[in-house]
Image: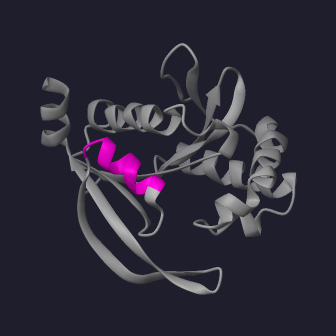
Amino acid sequence: MFKLHVDNDIHISLFQPRHASQLYSLVNANRDTLGEWLSFPGKTKSAEDSKVFIENSLTRFAEGNGFWAGIWYDGQLAGAIGYLYVDSAHRKTEIGYWLGTTFEGKGLVTKSCQGFIKHAFEEWDLNKVEINMAGENLKSRAVAERLGFKREGIIRDYEYLNGDFHDRFIYGMLRKEWNELKGK
């Protein structure tokens, strides 16, 4: 089981099948805003879809290849954060995240990412963490930059979503950079 206490108000815990209806409700309530940058809201049509997603995430967790967890704020599901994969051979991972709009502006994503970054470097002994997002997603870019990630590149026309092609911005942080940030 994965559970991370971020602060007195925020914790992150591995999604379980019992969370499927809560997860679906949060996705459904934020479908338009999430769908602006992410493809999964258009594919999430029911709580059963969320349950299948959670079961797949639990399989990946058991296999050591990433997982998704809920971001809980004052006991409410506020969003999700995940390790999209874990590349043990090259000692790297990528973090993804999203948040319901009513929970924005509270630092939940930034604080949750800090916990995930620390876990990746200190518990899993990885060398690199990436965060990738649509180039036009300024809020997500701001999170990566606030955390001290460096923009490493752009993949042009990476994804076709909502009738348009979107560039993908690649941000990365190395373990030595994390250690330097911790020391300040």
Is residue 126 on the magenta stretch?
no
Q: Pinpoint residue 148: horizontal percent, then vertical percent.
A: 25, 44
Q: State how many labels appear.
A: 0
Can you tell which quarter of the image residue 45 is in?
bottom right
Residue at the location (40% across, 47% down)? Answer: 143
Q: Is residue 88 left or right of residue 95?
A: left
Question: Which colour assignment does the render follow?
Answer: one colour
The answer to whether residue 85 shows anywhere in this view is: no
Q: Pinpoint residue 134: horizontal percent, then vertical percent.
A: 46, 68
Q: Up-down: is 155 above or below 114?
A: below
What type of secondary structure mainly makes up the magenta span? helix
Q: Up-down: is 92 above or below 2?
A: below
Nearer-the-camera pick, 135 or 1: 135
The answer to whether residue 169 shows anywhere in this view is: yes
Nearer-the-camera pick, 122 or 7: 7
Q: Pinpoint residue 99: horizontal percent, then vertical percent.
A: 61, 45
Q: In what quadrant of the picture does the C terminus appear?
A: top left
Residue at the location (63% across, 67% down)? Answer: 36
Nearer-the-camera pick, 59 or 46: 46
Q: Which residues are magenta?
A: 139-148
Q: In what quadrant of the picture does the N terminus appear?
A: top right
Can you tell which quarter of the image residue 43 is in?
bottom right
Residue at the location (80% across, 44% down)? Answer: 20
